[in-house]
Image (cartoon, grey):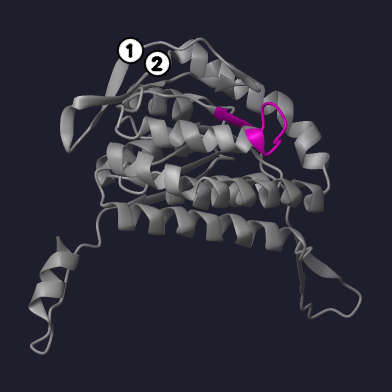
Amino acid sequence: MAPTPPVAGGLFVGGEWLAARDDFASHNPANLDEVVGTFPNATPAEVAAAVDAARAAFPAWRRTSRILRAEAFDRLAQFIKRDTDSLANLMARECGKNITECRAEVVEGLHMVQWVFGSGRLGVYGDVVASEIAEKDAFTRRKPWGVVGVVTPWNFPFAVPLWMLGPSLLEGNTCVFKPSEDTPAVGQRLVELFAEAGFPAGTLNLVHGDGAAGEAIVRDGRVNVVCFTGSYEVGRRIQELSAPLHDRIVAAEMGGKNAVVVCDDARFDLAVTAGV
């Protein structure tokens, strides 16, 4: 079998793929001689351009019918079904998980996309709140917040981005996405599927790079929401940089949940395999 050619990584800004650069390489952790792809390390100016594109796309996207926004996720779901095997193979090569776990993660991401599509038909725009005054009507109203910065980890490079990108885009926000520098090829493939599904230019923008690219997103005061999964140290840094911005929302999932309890009646061969 011929080796799979490396991915030529690029930035996706305002609906256009910028010229590929090979600033850094992504390697197969099971065979470090295999280059999965080469990718650009986004400069602060390129990150700012991605935020510009997201802000420019926001007014039209927020005015788009919620049902039409959801329809784009239905198309995305069909493409994920079509490409389940190739997505799982790419993830196994780049992330290092076994192929069964990778296929399960692709299906988990698919389920998130399907949930987002279904949510678009529910028409949940807020809640009527009980009022102690008969003449007063009280309600909450859900409205998009603006530009969402999405920074995701290497260990779930397909499902975790969809947890964040899916609801954000359905609600009428636009996004700037930075996948982990350890799994940029999976992140890029996901953005390619969003583009194929017909999401309008600028609604989803992709920047590659290390922590400096992520910090450039967080430092940009035009980013209204930051969604992050990763280490405690980085999450704390995001919170510190965001604290002076009175209208920014930060959702940071940090730390590990890695305890494994094995009871006396367990099959130890399965427990050890699952734990590893």
Q: Residue 145 in the image: x percent, y percent?
A: 66, 43
| Region in magenta | 196-205
Residue located farthest toward the front when viewing the structure as drawn: 1
Q: Which residue type does callout 1 highlight?
A: Asp
Q: Is residue 217 left or right of residue 101?
A: right
Other-residue count near label 2 (Cα within 10 Å), few / some / many at <14 / 14–19 / ≥20 = many
Per the image, label 1 sits on a secondary structure element best described as loop
Q: Is residue 173 visible?
A: yes
Q: Which residue type does callout 2 highlight?
A: Pro
Q: Tell me the residue that label 1 is attached to.
A: 23
For the residue pair 155 and 51, the one nearer the viewer reads as 155
Q: Residue at x 20, y 62 (%)?
A: 258
Q: Tell me the residue that label 2 is attached to.
A: 40
Q: Give the quarter of the figure containing the C terminus.
A: bottom left
* Residue 199 falls within the magenta-colored stretch: yes
Q: Residue 104 in the image: x percent, y percent?
A: 39, 59
